Amino acid sequence: MAKVVHLKKDCISCGACAAIAPQYWELDAEGLAQLKESLPVENHWEKEIPEQEIPVQEEAANVCPVQIIHVKKK
């Protein structure tokens, strides 16, 4: 298992994550990236993910120009 941490408030609405992984990422009504099925935790959003999802989430993190997506392996 791993966890994706998304600092949504710092999103610049480029949509790179949603373009790379539309099955997991989308743009919300305000045009900000939103990790589907994630939950707000303090000043960020989080989602537990299975091992097989780690590569695509790491790719989404790598294409983010402001580096606000983090994959934390447990």
Image: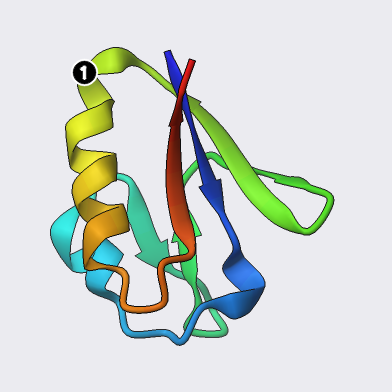
Identity of the residue drawn at 51% across and 78% down: 11
In this picture, residue 65 sits left or right of residue 49? left
Q: Hey, what amino acid is under mark 1?
A: Gln
In this picture, residue 2 sits left or right of residue 53? right
* Secondary element at tag 1: helix
Q: Nearer the viewer, residue 65 or 27?
A: 65
Q: In this view, does 63 lie above or below 9?
A: above
Identity of the residue drawn at 50% across and 72% down: 28
Identity of the residue drawn at 27% across and 29% down: 54
Q: In which quarter of the image is residue 67?
A: bottom left
Q: Which of 73 and 51 is in front in this view?
A: 73
Looking at the figure, which quarter contains the N terminus?
top left
How many neighbours does mark 1 have within 10 angstroms: few (below 14), some (14-19), or many (20 or more)?
A: few
Q: Is residue 34 above or below residue 57?
A: below
- Identify the residue under disc 1: 52
Identity of the residue drawn at 69% across and 55% down: 44
Where residue 73 sits in the image (x, y, percent)?
43, 23
